[in-house]
Image (spheres, rainbow, N blue to C red):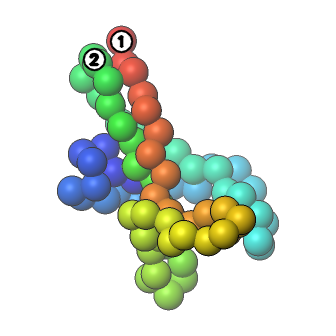
């Protein structure tokens, strides 16, 4: 997870059960200041390979594999 636009990355904790080949829930402690923010999430496999910042082009748009940006507004 990155809370600073990808300058630094923090490891999130797994939350709930884990199943091979399935989506995994996670959580991260973060206390944002009021206002608009962008959280960045990327996966890293057991070999240390991380998702790229931008997905490679493919004709039908399958296999999206890039950093995910999530807009957050804190009150």
- The first of marks 1 and 2 along the sequence is 2
Residue 75 in sight from this viewpoint: yes
Q: Of all residues shown, which one is farthest toward the bottom?
A: 47
Relative placement, left or right, of 71 versus 8 is: right
Q: Could you tell me how far apart the alpha carbons at marks 1 and 2 are, in whole angstroms? A: 5 Å
Q: Nearer the viewer, residue 36 or 63?
A: 63
Residue in the foreground of this view, choosing between 21 and 64: 64
What's the residue at 71%, 65% (across, down)? 60
64 sits left or right of 40 in the view: right
The percent position of residue 42, horizontal first and vertical second, equals 47, 61
Q: Which residue is mark 1?
A: 75
Q: Where does the image place residue 18, in percent across and percent down from the top left?
A: 73, 62
Q: Residue at x 29, y 18 (%)?
A: 35
**Total count of labels:** 2
Q: Residue furthest left?
A: 7
Tell me: residue 63, above or below residue 10.
below
Query: Are the residues at dot 1 and dot 2 in contact (C-beta closer than 8 Å)?
Result: yes
Q: Quadrant of residue 57?
A: bottom right
Q: Position of residue 22 (x, y in %)?
A: 76, 64
* SS for callout 2: loop
Q: Residue furthest front?
A: 59
How packed is label 1: few (under 14 Cα within 10 Å), some, or many (20 or more)?
Answer: few
| Frontmost residue, 35 versus 60 | 60
Q: Quadrant of residue 50?
A: bottom left
Task: Read off the residue under disc 2.
Answer: 34
- Please tell me whether mark 1 sits on a helix, a strand or a loop: loop
Q: Is residue 75 above or below residue 66?
A: above
Say which of 44 and 16 sits in front. 44
Residue at horizontal 36 percent and vertical 12 percent from the top: 75
Q: Is residue 11 left or right of residue 14?
A: left
Q: Residues within 10 Å of mark 2 (few under 14, many from 20)?
A: few
């Amino acid at each position: 997870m990155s809370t600073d636009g990808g300058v630094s990355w923090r490891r999130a904790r797994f939350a709930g059960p884990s199943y091979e080949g399935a989506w995994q829930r996670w959580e991260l402690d973060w206390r944002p200041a009021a206002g608009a923010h962008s959280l960045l999430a990327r996966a890293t496999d057991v070999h240390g390979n991380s998702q790229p910042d931008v997905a490679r082009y493919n004709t039908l748009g399958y296999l999206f594999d890039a950093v995910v940006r999530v807009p957050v507004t804190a009150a």
